[in-house]
């Protein structure tokens, strides 16, 4: 039982990093991205390749993943964010579909459908992360650092500019805000930090393939943010906990066939999002943080 709970906690932590970083662009900047799983995958594949091919440790592999994620995000954001937001949604969806194809078909690099196996344990200096408990500590440390950085950014002048653009892009531009530059930087930061989750995921499982980085993953991440509460720091974490715990809870319901859990899970997610949009549009955590400037 402890091994199961530890594994669940690690996965919740990784998904919380992804949800918090997606919320940075979705909640604070008003940028709807359907490609967050792409940067998760880029971080995972890059870290895996650095570890397997070059023998790099966790910091080198994670840094490489962040750098590649930033480059790809700039290629997406620089042209798409110069126009209205709906074009970025379409562009990000296109990137998501393209990335799945690349992850699946570029067999010499990604391993194709079979993915990359035998990823070595993460190394931090002279310390090798070997046990599930150590991976949980590493995941929580990374989550804490990401949340701290996001909090600092949100409460900085950069964060205030983001929220001004989200609330009224035309007015922000009229007051001299460089809208395209600020939005592009927000996407780059979000993508780089999502790659950290990808690196953690690759080292933790010692195996990755395309199935973890599809459009479904991007949709689930958006559900975590919306259910927990957009433009809040802790809302996406709450959403991650709820969405990761739901399959575990359903598996213990008597009389429920295991083959039906996935379908019921989808129905519950959809119903929860509809009800929240109607009765609590700020999400489960939203109204807690709003009086404090959505922190």
Image (cartoon, rainbow, N blue to C red):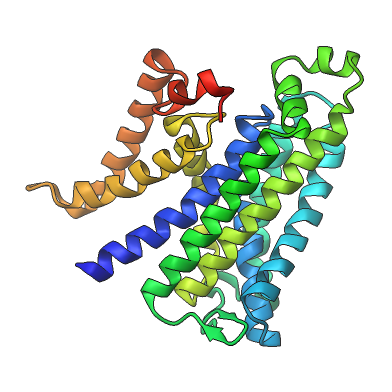
Question: Which of 138/52 is in front?
Answer: 138
Is residue 131 depicted above or below 235 in this figure?
below
- Name the residue furthest left: 254
Is residue 146 depicted above or below 277 in this figure?
below
Res 124 seen here: yes
Residue sitting at x 40%, y 62%: 10
Specify whether 143 is left or right of 134: right
Specify whether 252 is left or right of 102: left
Res 215 seen here: no
Specify whether 271 is left or right of 222: left
Picture quadrant of residue 103: bottom right
Counting from the top left corner in percent of width and height, residue 88 is at 74, 33
Is residue 117 depicted above or below 210 in this figure?
below
Counting from the top left corner in percent of width and height, residue 33 is at 65, 37
Question: Which of 124/165 is in front?
Answer: 124
Counting from the top left corner in percent of width and height, residue 114 is at 52, 75
Tag count in the figure? 0
């Amino acid at each position: 039982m402890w091994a199961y709970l530890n594994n669940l906690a690690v996965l919740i932590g990784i998904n919380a990093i992804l949800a918090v970083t997606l919320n940075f662009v979705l909640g604070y900047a008003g940028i709807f991205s359907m490609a967050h799983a792409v940067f998760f995958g880029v971080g995972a594949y890059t870290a895996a390749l650095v570890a397997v091919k070059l023998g790099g440790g966790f910091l080198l592999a994670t840094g490489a993943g962040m750098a590649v994620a930033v480059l790809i995000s700039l290629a997406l954001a620089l042209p798409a964010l110069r126009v209205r937001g709906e074009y970025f949604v379409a562009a990000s969806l296109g990137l998501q579909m393209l990335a799945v194809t690349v992850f699946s078909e570029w067999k010499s690099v990604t391993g194709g459908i079979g993915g990359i196996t035998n990823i070595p344990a993460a190394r931090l200096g002279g310390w090798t992360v070997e046990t599930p408990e150590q991976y949980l500590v590493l995941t929580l440390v990374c989550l804490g650092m990401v949340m701290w950085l996001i909090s600092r950014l949100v409460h900085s002048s950069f964060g205030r500019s983001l929220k001004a653009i989200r609330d009224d892009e035309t007015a922000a531009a009229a007051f001299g805000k460089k809208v395209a530059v600020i939005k592009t930087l927000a996407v780059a930061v979000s993508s780089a930090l999502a790659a950290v989750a990808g690196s953690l995921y690759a080292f933790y499982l010692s195996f990755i393939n395309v199935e973890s980085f599809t459009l479904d993953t991007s949709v689930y991440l958006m559900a975590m943010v919306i259910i927990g509460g957009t433009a809040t720091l802790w809302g996406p974490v709450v959403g991650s906990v709820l969405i990761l715990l739901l399959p575990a809870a359903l598996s213990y319901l008597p009389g429920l066939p295991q083959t039906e859990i996935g379908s019921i899970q989808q129905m519950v997610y959809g119903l929860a999002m509809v009800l929240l949009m109607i009765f609590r549009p700020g999400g489960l955590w939203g109204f807690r943080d709003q009086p404090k400037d959505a922190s």
